[in-house]
Image: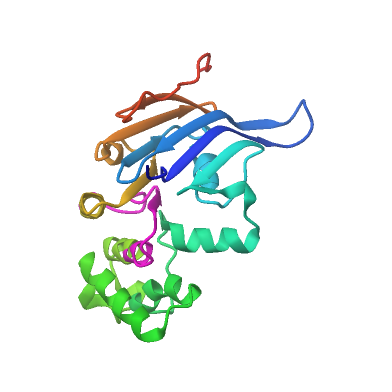
């Protein structure tokens, strides 16, 4: 049986060591996401969703609990292996696009492949194909400041796709976009999902979550609701408002 993309069990994250001032950002979170799912993780500020995203993206480590990414035990990875995992297993899409300003759209999309050691010719071919896939193939030579916000996010999605990762992890991907560009980017993520890619979106926007087939809601560092899961998911009890 194929391993799930995400298998997290009993994740906790505590900031600080003093018992009086320590903050428990995650409190026993368990989450399983299979290949091909489209999941939205929702919650208000302070709910723990950003902390969970950082752990799922191998940008932070839990205080306790276990996390397997596409079958790999993240706790057993050293920093070099974590860097490889972030580059090859996860395609990141951020609210602020995170494009290199003085570099063309093509070079931005090539970047993960350069880190992976892909040869220049193949790198260019795959990056051009990814840009065409997201509808900005004719903008390959443009700098980010020559693109609209929606076009910049499309380039960011192309960059996330080009390495053929196990999942796309999108953090508030429409937060800096107008309503028209928001619909365009959500349509694009739908197309990526329909093509078989796993999508995990961190959001507080109902419009974004409505596109997902599964919605995970968080509060006070716990999962309080998980709708649309393929199998019943354990939900923490006793969460306070």
Residue at 37%, 79% in the rendered image: 123
Q: Quadrant of residue 195?
A: bottom left
Q: Give whichever of 58, 184 is nearer the camera.
A: 58
Q: Which color scheme does this rendered protein use?
A: rainbow
- Which region shows up in magenta? 158-180
Q: Give whichever of 201, 87 is nearer the camera.
A: 87
Against 224, is 175 above or below? below
Q: x%, y% of residue 215?
A: 34, 32
From the viewer's perspective, tell me whether residue 63 is left or right of residue 203.
Answer: right
Q: Can see residue 219?
A: yes
- Residue 95 covered by magenta stretch: no
Q: Can see residue 100?
A: no
Q: x%, y% of residue 12?
A: 61, 33
Residue at 58%, 58% in the rendered image: 82
Q: Give whichever of 208, 236 is nearer the camera.
A: 236
Q: Quadrant of residue 17?
A: top right
From the viewer's perspective, tell me whether residue 72 is left or right of residue 166.
Answer: right
Q: x%, y% of residue 40?
A: 35, 38
């Amino acid at each position: 049986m194929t391993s799930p993309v995400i298998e997290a069990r009993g994740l906790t994250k505590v900031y600080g060591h003093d018992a009086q001032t320590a903050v428990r950002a995650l409190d026993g979170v368990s989450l399983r996401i299979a290949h091909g799912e489209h999941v939205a993780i929702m919650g208000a500020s302070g709910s723990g969703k950003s902390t969970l995203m950082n752990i799922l993206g191998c940008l932070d480590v839990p205080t306790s609990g276990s996390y397997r990414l596409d079958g790999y035990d993240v706790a057993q990875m050293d920093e070099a292996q974590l860097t490889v995992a972030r580059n090859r297993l996860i395609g990141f899409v951020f609210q602020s696009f995170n494009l290199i300003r003085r570099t063309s759209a093509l070079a931005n999309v090539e970047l993960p492949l350069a880190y992976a050691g892909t040869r220049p010719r193949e790198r260019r071919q795959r990056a051009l194909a990814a840009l065409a896939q997201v509808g900005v193939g004719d903008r390959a030579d443009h700098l980010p400041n020559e693109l609209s916000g929606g076009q910049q996010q499309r380039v960011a999605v192309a960059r996330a796709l080009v390495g053929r990762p196990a999942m796309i992890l999108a953090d508030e991907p429409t937060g800096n976009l107008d309503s028209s560009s928001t619909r365009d980017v959500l349509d694009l993520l739908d197309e990526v999902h329909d093509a078989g890619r796993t999508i995990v979106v961190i959001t507080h926007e109902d419009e974004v979550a409505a596109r997902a087939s599964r919605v995970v809601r968080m509060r006070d560092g716990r999962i309080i609701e998980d709708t649309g899961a393929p199998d019943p998911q354990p939900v923490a009890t006793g969460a306070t408002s």
